[in-house]
Each structure stands twice: as structure tokens, then as C-alpha cells.
Image (cartoon, rainbow, N blue to C red):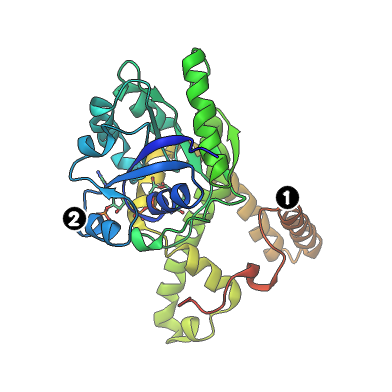
Amino acid sequence: MSAVFERIAIIGAGLIGGSIARGAMEKGAAGAVSIFDMDAASLKRAGEIGLGDVRATIADAVRDADAVFLCVPVGAMGQTGRDSAAAMKAGAILTDVGSVKGSVAKELHAAAKPGVHIIPGHPIAGTEKSGPDAGFGALFEGRWCIITPDGGGDAEYRAATDRLAAFWEKLGSKVERMDAQRHDLVLAVTSHLPHLIAYNIVATAYDMESVTEGEVVKFSAAGFRDFTRIAASDPTMWRDVFLNNKEAVLEVLGRFDDDLTALRKAIRNSDGKTLFDVFTHARGIRRSIIDAGQDTAAPNFGRDIDEKK
Ligand code: NAP
């Protein structure tokens, strides 16, 4: 079967960029990969581990590419988008993998030049690791990839959107088309708020650490350990997510505050029925996530217990 794109360019040789590069070559979704990272050490490493043809500038990386994937933190999408669009060939696709879509789509559309198709995207897959060595080709298998194409595009634009969808499907993803604002609200609930809570719980526990003299770490139970894993995610990436999805996160945070206040009240009033009902409902939601194939029912969520592996 032929490749979807003859050559793709990856800007940002980290976890997601490295995984796209590996997946594209392993699964035959691209004939060749050009790669650029502003960090000289990361770029050198990307070359050493064979992620693609190392290019010294963004312009060099994108010039002969049929699709350009911006895999940098959300705050760097605007600049890398402008630098890419300026050097891309007509008919090529400019896309990204950012965890926020409204602000990124706006910046990419502003960077657009005639003949370059802007199709923002977000693969809902990742780990808490970062850097060129963190990527692996199977990362996107069975995971959703949301793309947020411009609703009113012409036939050429629609064909480009279908090609991008075909690329992600070849990497093993299930593709969903969505409005950028809708994406940002959904992800604020399912990803952004959980990360904020994890960062906050770990910060609270760290403060408690001085009170309990090491016991938080020593007796850290599975629940807390899961939060620390989430809170180990890249600080630059998550800072940019919250700065760029303010509105949706603040809306969801308001609702979360209300629900937390209700739980606090139930505990204070020894209202066991309310606590039991909320926990039972939550357990049902967990069941539906497993039934939808979004997680495993295996103990420890099917993860290898040895962190070093
Ligand atoms: P990462 O492993 O830290 O990789 C990002 C790479 O981009 C780093 O090597 C970084 O270099 C480089 N970079 C930063 N600014 C750049 C610029 N202006 N030009 C060129 N390279 C630049 O991060 P990641 O986890 O792959 O995340 C990349 C994007 O994917 C983010 O937008 C994130 O929202 C999105 N995403 C992440 C996940 C996840 O779970 N991690 C999931 C889905 C989507 P430095 O190290 O020097 O900064």
C-alpha cells in the first residue's frame, strides 16, 4: 500500500513529534520524514536515533514536505506556524498536535498563505515523558485523533482533510472532526482539569510532607501515586495549555468547585447517602470508559509496575 504523504516534516522532536515520525515510517504512512527542533541537543539526538532527516532550519525542514506537523508547546505554535507557512509549497498541509485548538487554529489561520491548507489537530494520546527518546510508533494505536478543519473549505481543502485523516488512521488512530471551541471544552473536562487537580494534590502533599516527616512519600498509596505520575508531565506544555484554554478551564473549574463544596458539606453533615450516591455514579462512568475501550480493567490500569521499564 502506498504512503499517504511522500514526505512529512516534524517541527519539535519530542514525545509526540518522535512518535509521529516513528509511526509514519513503521506503518508506511509517509515515504520520508524531515525533522527540526530548536534545541540543538534534541535535534542531534533525533538524528542519532533515526527519527528522520535532520534539517538545520524550519524552512529547510518544510520546503519539500507534503504535510507539516507542528509538535511544539502550544505557546510556540504561532511562531513555528508562521515560519513554516512562509516556506511551504502550494498544496501542502500545515497541521499541529497542540492540546488546545481554539487559540492555535486562530494563529495558524492568521499565518496561512494561499495554497497551504491549515488543518489543526490533536491526537488524544501521550505519556508523562518528553524528549526525542520518549516517542514510540504505537502511541496512537486505538486512540482518538481530533481534527478541527475549517467548516467552509473548498473541494481541494476537503480532499486535504481526508488525506490528513487517512494519515492518522494509518498510524492506528480513530479520527473525529470537531469544532475547535467544542474540542477545548471537552478537553478542559477530560484532560486539563485532571492535570490541574494532580498538580495541586501533589503540591498539597508536598506541603504536608514537612508536617508528616516523610510519611506521605513512604506510605504513598496507589491513588496518590497515580496523581504524581500525571503531575510529572512537562511543565512548559501544561503552562501553555492553561494560558491558552483559559475560558473553558475556568468554566469547568467553577463547576468542579460547586461539586467539591457539595461533597465537603456531605462529609461535614455525615451525609453517607450523598457520598454513596456520588461514588456509585462515578464508578458507573469508569465502567463506561472501559466498555468504550478507552482504558483497561486490569489492576493498576494495566501499567507496568516497574517505572524504569
Ligand atoms: P516535548 O516532548 O517537550 O517536545 C516538544 C519539543 O519541541 C521539544 O524538543 C522542544 O524543545 C521543542 N520546541 C519548543 N519550542 C520550539 C520551537 N519554537 N521550535 C522548534 N522546536 C521547539 O513535548 P510533547 O509532549 O511532544 O508535546 C508537544 C505538543 O503536543 C504540545 O503542543 C502538546 O500540547 C501536544 N500534546 C502532548 C501530549 C502529551 O501527552 N505529551 C498529548 C497530545 C498532544 P525544548 O525541549 O528545548 O523546549
Q: Secondary structure at mark 2?
A: helix
Nearer-the-camera pick, 47 or 223: 47
The residue under the point 35% across, 17% down is 115
Nearer-the-camera pick, 290 or 251: 290
The residue under the point 54% across, 50% down is 140
Q: Which residue is mark 1?
A: 292
Tell me which corner region of the image, top left, top right, bottom left or bottom right, holds residue 210: bottom left
Question: Which class describes the residues within 10 Å of circle 2: few (<14), some (14-19), or many (20+)?
Answer: few
Q: Which residue is mark 2?
A: 40
Nearer-the-camera pick, 264 or 283: 283
The residue under the point 36% across, 63% down is 133
Instruction: Report, in whole angstroms, how far the alpha carbon at label 2 lies from the one at label 1.
Output: 41 Å
Which of the image's four quarters has the N terminus? top right
Q: Position of residue 13 (x, y in %)?
A: 32, 52
Nearer-N-terminus badge (2/1):
2
On the rendered structure, is 187 left or right of 199? right
Q: Amino acid at mark 2?
A: Ala
Tell me which corner region of the image, top left, top right, bottom left or bottom right, holds residue 241: top left
248 w.r.t. 230: above or below: above
Q: Secondary structure at mark 1?
A: loop
Viewer-side label of 2, 1: 2
Q: Amino acid at mark 1?
A: Ala
Inspect this view and state whether residue 299 appears.
yes
Number of marks in picture? 2
Q: Position of residue 201 (x, y in %)?
A: 49, 65
